Amino acid sequence: MGAFDIVVVGAGISGSTLAERYAVRGSRVLVLEKRHHIGGNCYDSFDDHGILVSNYGAHLFHTEYEDVWRYVNRFAQWHPYEHRVLARVDGKLVPIPVNITTVNSVFGLTMQSQAEMQRFLDRVQVQHPAPRNGEEAALARVGHVLYEKMFKHYTKKQWNKYPHELDASVLQRIPIRTNFDDRYFSDRYQALPLEGYTKLFEKMLAHPNIEVRLNTDYFDVRDSAEVRGCGKLFYAGPIDRFFDYRHSRHRKLQWRSIHFEWITLDQEFFQENSVINYPDPADGEFTRIVEYKHFTRQKHDKTTISREYTTDEGDPYYPVPNPENDAIYRRYQEEADRLANVHFVGRLANYRYFNMDQAFKNALDLFHGLEGDDGNLL
């Protein structure tokens, strides 16, 4: 293709969206991806038994953004899917978010109305108007008993820190419903792509103006003429890596990763739900078990599950919010803001966790901010 107008580092949601938008606009786009596949952590594939699994864990699409919903429908057919999560508590499976059913099961109650649920919460919640840490934030949401049974030890598994060691924002997101609604999300649009996420990304990147190079690390080729000569660079990798960790002093920005233990069983289904959380340490060190056939609707006489263990080593998944990491990131952000024609996009570059729709929205908004309205969006 010769020289490129745009170089995109990373073929996940953010990079693929920007590559597709600029290609439609007429720009020549080079996408560099260090992994052997496109799609980032949304990548899915068939395992050795022919079962479609998400290689980096479950990804559930849900959004209130009309423009994001219209955009993703350009590249896939979707089937409605409302996600539900159960947690194993005292040997029973109870819904998350906490709702009337959860409280009735844990406390042996028979509440039936929102008013009763609200009175219950008013009794048990520990008032912390300005919580200083995750424990105070959780107690202000659910009180002592639910905190101990459902969130304290699960947080330790997830972050290798107890809630009192984490920023309040981590547990302020605990969802509570005062009714019987057991859906994990309440967004207007909730769906999964019929053919899986990888097919969606293949269609996004199929434009003739796009060249994708897999197994290519940007840092191995950043001094090449075609990269240095591009008009704009969009970087969706870790921001501290871009700046050679110069502000990190003793360590990199901290991330939590996930180790997957994959098991295929000679039975049609293993569990009644797609995701079951295990907050009790007595059940094991894994945080949850995911069964993918519940997502895909695939017919198969076997089933594949994954037990998830969060770790400090491996691919970055969750930024660790604390004052030290925030201070380090701000120094990189200040340096990034001074660069001309280099744009940092996505969760790794922004040191921020994004839901899928937020990642699409972040990339679309960046494109619109740089190039104005895009009549080809619809």
Image: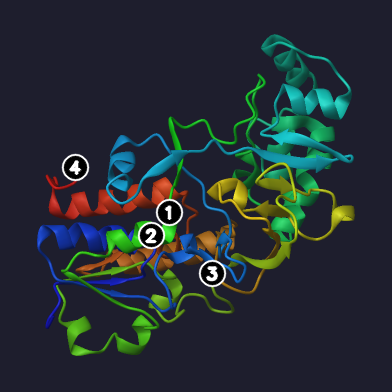
Q: What's the CA distance linking mark 4 and mark 1? A: 22 Å
Q: Which mark is residue 253?
A: 3
Q: What's the CA distance linking mark 4 and mark 2? A: 20 Å
In primary-sequence order, the first of circles 2 and 3 is: 2
Q: Position of residue 333 (x, y in %)?
A: 38, 63
Q: What's the CA distance linking mark 1 and mark 2? A: 6 Å
- Residue receiving disc 2: 199
Q: What's the CA distance linking mark 1 and mark 3? A: 35 Å
Is the residue under label 2 in contact with that under label 1 (CB below 8 Å)? yes
Q: Is residue 217 or residue 53 the one in the foreground?
A: 53
Q: Quadrant of the C terminus?
A: top left
Q: Which mark is residue 378?
A: 4
Is the residue under label 3 in contact with that under label 2 (CB below 8 Å)? no
Q: Which mark is residue 195?
A: 1
Residue 143 as seen in the image, left or right of residue 176: right
Residue drawn at (38%, 59%), measured in percent from left and top? 199
Is 249 placed above or below 118 here? below
Q: Amino acid under label 4?
A: Leu
Q: Position of residue 243 (x, y in %)?
A: 39, 78
Is the residue under label 1 in contact with that under label 4 (CB below 8 Å)? no
Q: Which mark is nearer the camera, 4 or 2?
A: 2
Q: Position of residue 364 (x, y in %)?
A: 27, 50
Q: What's the CA distance linking mark 2 and mark 3? A: 32 Å
Residue 135 as seen in the image, left or right of residue 38: right
